[in-house]
Structure formats: structure tokens, C-alpha cells
Image (cartoon, helix red, strand yellow):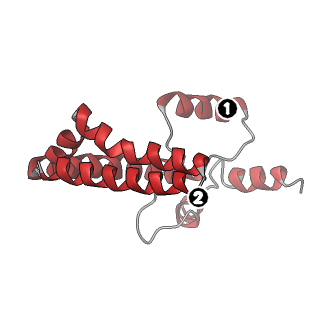
Amino acid sequence: MLTSTVCAAVSAAGLGIAALTAYRKRFLAATRIAAFSLFPIGLVLTGVIDWLTDIVFKPSVWAGFGVLALSAVLFTIGRVVERRRGIGSRKERKERKAAAAARPDAVAPAASVPSLGAGHTAAQPAAKAKGKGGAPKDDFSDIEAILKKHGI
């Protein structure tokens, strides 16, 4: 009820300003002012103002907006993490595996190399294998692949 009164007062004031502007023979500006001043009373008559006040003054509506905002934030965080890790969709992962399988001389991407755990390096398993009596078959294959890639 109060919002309807305020909107009616704003519209009346706007129409008064439009009348003064028309009196000064600025009819185009007066027409624009009249159009803007009729907008609040039109919103009251259509019921939009009552709907908006119901939204603004209900705590459950604000809780709903909070849940929607949380949902949007979580979705955005998930997409950012997905892009940083280069995970992609299943289809994209299959395409990358197929492309990697088609190039046997290519070096495996860092995401697909298994972790050796804390304190271990790639040189330690090779050194242990040499100490047992023989060099492993693919001892320097990854290094050779890198050198071939750079044309050395």
C-alpha cells in the first residue's frame, strides 16, 4: 500500500515537471519526461510493485537467492578447477588418448605419468635396476623422445 502511494506521488511529480517543460515549449523533452513519469504508476496497476515488495521483504526469498548464488559459485569453481587441470569431458580425454597412441615417439603428458611418491625420483628406479645386473630396456627412452622432439 505504501509503495503504491509512493509510486503515485512520483508519477504526479513527474507529470508536473513534464507540464512545466511543455510550458517552456520544449515539447520533445516534455514527452520523454511524461513517459518516464507514467512508468511507476503503470507498474503499480499491473501488480509488479506488489510482487517486488513481496520478494524484497521475505527472508525465505533472500535465502533462495543465497542458495542460487552459492550454486553459481560452486559451478564456477568446478569449471575453473577443471580447466586448470585439463581434465575436460570423457570425449576429450578419449580423443587425447587416441592422439597419444597414434604417436609412439611422443612423450606422455605429465598428467598421465604415475607419481612415484615422496622422496623418489625417476633416476632411482633406473639406478636400482642397473645395480641388479643389467640395464632396463627403456632406460633412456623418455630422454630420447625429448631429444627427437627438439631435433637433437
> Is residue 19 positioned above or below 91 on the image?
below
Asked whether disc 1 touches disc 2, contact meaning CB atoms under 8 Å apart, the reply is no
**Could you say which quadrant of the image residue 41 lies in?**
top left
The answer to whether residue 54 is left or right of residue 123 is: left
Residue in front for this viewpoint, 147 or 75: 75
Residue in front for this viewpoint, 137 or 8: 8
**Could you say which quadrant of the image residue 9 lies in?**
bottom left
- Label located before the other in sequence (1 or 2): 1
Q: Residues within 10 Å of mark 1 (few under 14, many from 20)?
A: few
Farthest bottom residue? Answer: 119
Q: Circle 2 — which element?
A: loop
Count of marks overlaid on the render? 2
Q: Amino acid at mark 1?
A: Ala
Q: Which mark is residue 122?
A: none
The answer to whether residue 99 is left or right of residue 13 is: right
Task: Locate residue 31, reporting x and y percent.
Answer: 53, 44
Q: Which mark is residue 133?
A: 2
Q: Please name the residue that numbered disc 1 is placed on.
A: 99
Q: Amino acid at mark 2?
A: Gly
Residue in front for this viewpoint, 34 or 50: 34
**Mark 1 or 2, which is nearer the eye?**
1
Residue ID at (73%, 57%): 143
Farthest right residue? Answer: 151
Task: Locate residue 131, reporting x and y percent.
Answer: 56, 64
The residues tagged by marks 1 and 2 sit, at their Cα atoms, a distance apart of: 37 Å
The answer to whether residue 85 is left or right of residue 147 is: left
